[in-house]
Amino acid sequence: MTGKKFLGVVTLICLSAALSACDQEEQGRILSYDKGTYLGPADQKLGAEQVRELETRTNMQAWY
């Protein structure tokens, strides 16, 4: 194998390895963290009906 062919194969292998490491679900993640601070998206507010259902469920589980 000549030097140019070898370099081309190595370049192709490195390029395919680099591209395969970029999964879609890993894009846009927070990489810099502040200790004690939540940096994710804001939580949704619960409606009155959802709060009532959660209270009912916790009351049913609090028998012991």
Image: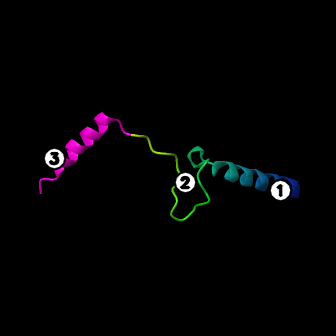
Counting from the top left corner in percent of width and height, residue 3 is at 87, 58
In the image, is residue 51 part of the stretch drawn in magenta? yes
Q: State which tag comes first along the sequence, 3 or 1.
A: 1
**Total numbered labels:** 3
Is 26 positioned to the left or the right of 11 in the image?
left
Q: CA distance from mark 3 to mark 1?
A: 68 Å
Determine which residue is flagged by label 3.
60
In the image, what residue type sits under mark 2? Leu
Q: CA distance from mark 1 to mark 2?
A: 44 Å
Q: Is residue 18 above or below residue 36?
A: above
Q: Are marks 3 and 1 in contact (CB under 8 Å)?
A: no
Q: Main secondary structure of the magenta part?
A: helix
Quadrant in which the N terminus appears: bottom right
In percent of the image, x 52 and y 59: which residue is there?
A: 37
The crowd level at tag 1 (other Cα within 10 Å; few <14, some 14-19, many 20+) is: few
In percent of the image, x 58 and y 61: which residue is there?
A: 33
Counting from the top left corner in percent of width and height, residue 50 is at 30, 37
Determine which residue is flagged by label 1.
7
| Residue segment shown in magenta | 46-64
The crowd level at tag 3 (other Cα within 10 Å; few <14, some 14-19, many 20+) is: few
Determine which residue is flagged by label 2.
39
Determine the image quadrant of residue 6: bottom right
In percent of the image, x 72 and y 53: which residue is there?
A: 13
Pick the residue in front: 19 or 56: 56
- Helix, strand or loop under label 2: loop
Q: State which tag comes first along the sequence, 1 or 2.
A: 1
